[in-house]
Amino acid sequence: MGPRNVSSPDIRVDCITDEVLDAIRQYTIGWVFFGIESGSDRVLRMMGKGATVREVEEAVERCREHNLNVAGSFIVGYPGETERDYEATKDLIAGLCLDDVFVSSAEPIPGTPLADLAVRTPREKNPAFVPHTGEYRPLDLTESEARCFDLMMHADMYRPQIRLVTDEIYSAYLAEAKKQGRDIRAATDLILRYARA
């Protein structure tokens, strides 16, 4: 135990106080992990996050004032996410300059609002199934996979210590985006099968 071995669990951007941030700095490894999810207030409302982009920005700023490292988790490919929403997420990452970023494609889990949305979203409008037709078209990705892959590389350019995307990192990001895509399509198909039963 002690500050070299203990990290604080994920915390909501609207639940931090000076006392909490001081305790994280004093008693943990000094990192705060936020589930930011999107740079679009519209998508955050669809997700039911209960927080706004402005609250995210303020929370990250407060963490910096307390000399804490900040990591953020993001979700792409949420049904209904537009190109404009996705670009807002990229802009937010560029502006926040987070110490670490985790990117996932939206995965429907049975019994959740996202699973219900996945059931209601036609396959031809679900980013987990729609073929990507943009710059990554030769990679044979879905829109969700392309955004996941792109955001991983984008985030690396906006860290305090820029991470160069080498061939190995590129391949690892591409493999991860494709794996998430396969898993999400399988989960969606399973949910759809039981929803029709």
Image (cartoon, rainbow, N blue to C red):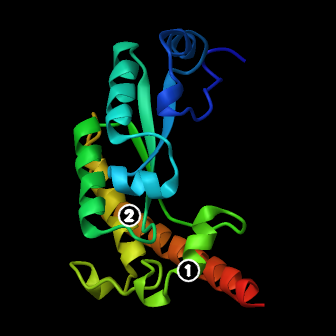
Closer to the camera: disc 1 or disc 2?
1
Residue at x-position 29% and y-position 45%: 93
In the rendering, at what x and y percent does residue 141 appear?
Answer: 38, 82
- Residue 191, above or below 169: below
Q: Which mark is residue 178?
A: none
Element carrying mark 1: helix
Q: Is residue 103 visible?
A: no
Element carrying mark 2: helix
Q: Is residue 98 visible?
A: yes
Residue at x-position 42% and y-position 31%: 70
- Residue 67, above or below 73: above
Q: Quadrant of residue 1?
A: top right
In the rendering, at what x and y percent does residue 107 appear?
Answer: 57, 67
> The disc labelled 2 sits on which kind of residue?
Glu
Q: Which mark is residue 120?
A: 1
Residue at x-position 55% and y-position 15%: 20
In the rendering, at what x and y percent does residue 78 appear?
Answer: 45, 66
Assess disc 2: are there few (<14), some (14-19) or many (≥20) residues with their C-alpha within 10 Å of its C-alpha: few
Q: Disc 2 designates what residue? A: 168
Q: CA distance from mark 1 to mark 2?
A: 38 Å
Residue extending furthest right? 197
Residue at x-position 36% and y-position 55%: 42
